């Protein structure tokens, strides 16, 4: 028994995956292909993808938003949890990486339910707000460049409906956020982001030690 979160070593992590992960074969293939890419560490953990899908089902989401697509692994998990009429707006800057994503979305038969917008996400989110999309989304996932996390969060919160959920990846940053001697740009950005959310009275908040740390925030009414 423990009154703190249990440290997960390789053996326990293996058991966690064996006992709980229900990863469809197509997602496993996408994860394996991504693992061979130079920036494979940008891939979320499989249990985190499953947890995102769990959240989507839990709140009955129909309209979702993703900031940072990479090869589409998280997108595929999210859309797999949506009802048939559910959609995902996906934002990214990389044509090469999202071409991998589109290939798997097509194979899964969900490509027509994902609206991929290529370009700087800050500009795309601003256009979405200006186009009258405030309060239109049930769920959002942010996993992109860390220095812009706060900008993404503020825009996404505006686009979420009351009771909607936003999940943000990498908030523990490999443990660097807890190291006061680490003054790298991304580390500082994530620290400031975490502090901002901790003080934000517009949301209900929890930080979960899954993957590289996942913050889940619910927009209050």
Image (cartoon, rainbow, N blue to C red):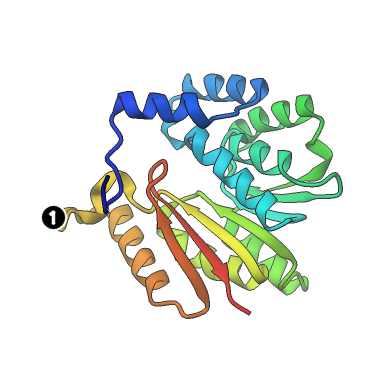
| Residue linked to disc 1 | 181
| Residue 163 percent coordinates (x, y) | 65, 70
Identity of the residue drawn at 80% across and 50% down: 86
Name the secondary structure under disc 1: loop
- Hey, which residue is sitting farthest front in the picture? 1
Q: Residue at x 79, y 36 (%)?
A: 111
Q: Could you tell me which residue is drawn at 33 percent across and 53 percent down? A: 186
Q: Which residue in the rendered view is the most extreme toward the left?
A: 181
Q: Is residue 18 above or below residue 208?
A: above
The percent coordinates of residue 115 (x first, y second) are 76, 47
- x then y, percent, for residue 95: 63, 36
Of 38 and 111, the residue lying toward us: 111
| In-image side of 63 versus 188 (left or right) | right
- Residue 127 at x, y percent in the picture: 70, 67
Left or right, residue 118 beside residue 192: right
Relative to 166, does residue 212 appear above or below in the rendering? above
The residue sitting at 52% across, 73% down in the picture is 203
94 over 149 or under it: above or below: above
- Quarter of the figure with the C terminus: bottom right
Of 87 and 218, the residue lying toward us? 218
Relative to 41, residue 128 above or below = below
């Amino acid at each position: 028994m423990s009154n703190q979160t249990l440290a997960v070593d390789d053996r326990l992590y293996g058991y966690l995956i064996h006992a709980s992960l229900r990863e469809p074969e197509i997602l496993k293939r996408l994860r394996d292909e991504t693992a061979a890419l130079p920036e494979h560490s940008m891939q979320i953990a499989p249990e985190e993808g499953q947890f995102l899908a769990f959240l989507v089902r839990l709140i009955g989401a129909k309209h979702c938003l993703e900031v940072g697509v990479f090869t589409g692994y998280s997108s595929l998990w999210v859309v797999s949890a949506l009802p048939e009429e559910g959609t995902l707006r996906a934002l990214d800057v990389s044509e090469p990486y999202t071409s991998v994503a589109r290939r798997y979305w097509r194979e899964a038969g969900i490509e027509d339910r994902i609206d991929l917008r290529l370009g700087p996400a800050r500009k795309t989110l601003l256009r979405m707000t200006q186009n009258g999309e405030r309060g239109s989304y049930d769920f959002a996932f942010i996993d992109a460049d860390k220095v812009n996390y706060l900008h993404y969060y503020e825009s996404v919160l505006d686009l979420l409906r009351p009771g909607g959920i936003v999940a943000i990846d990498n908030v523990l940053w490999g443990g660097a956020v807890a190291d006061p001697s680490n003054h790298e740009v991304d580390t500082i950005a994530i620290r400031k982001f975490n502090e901002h959310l901790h003080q934000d009275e517009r949301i209900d908040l929890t930080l979960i030690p899954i993957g590289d740390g996942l913050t889940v925030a619910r927009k209050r009414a």
